[in-house]
Image: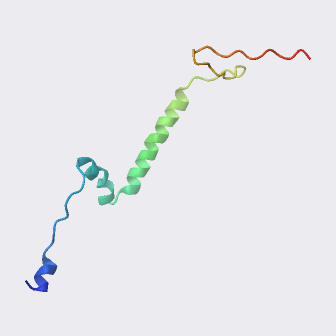
Amino acid sequence: MSRRTNRRRRIARPMYGGFSVRVLSLPARLHMRWLVILAVMVVAMGAYARVLMTAPAMPPGKAPTAESGDGRAEADPPPDAG
């Protein structure tokens, strides 16, 4: 064979990985990396905003307490008499 025919012959690259590898590399192959990153960030920020908006408000006079393993709140130590 001559060198010219060797240059023209293309060897197909083997596909490494399975379906998930091909799907996860799809945005890179389509040159849409930043669009996908932006979409994931928007979805994450929206989920976090929903959690913040639907959380019940904490009463201003009641501080959070640490709970013991049995689910009861630990009592504060009595104030010093001195």
Q: Position of residue 37 (x, y in %)?
A: 42, 51
Residue for point 10% across, 81% down: 5
Quadrant of image for the C terminus: top right
Q: Taking 59 as reference, is 34 above or below it? A: below
Residue for point 16% across, 69% down: 11
Residue for point 54% across, 30% down: 53
Residue 12 shown left or right of residue 57 in the figure: left
Residue 30 visible somewhere in the drawing: no
Counting labels gives: 0
Q: Position of residue 77 (x, y in %)?
A: 77, 17
Task: Name, please, the residue furthest toward the front.
Answer: 69
Quadrant of image for the N terminus: bottom left
Residue 45 visible somewhere in the drawing: yes
Residue for point 43% across, 41% down: 43
Q: Position of residue 69 (x, y in %)?
A: 58, 18
Residue 1 shown left or right of residue 11 in the figure: left
- Pick the residue in front: 20 or 53: 20
Residue 68 shown left or right of residue 77 in the figure: left
Q: Taking 64 as reference, is 22 above or below it? A: below
Q: How is the image coloured?
A: rainbow
Task: Name, please, the residue furthest toward the left.
Answer: 1
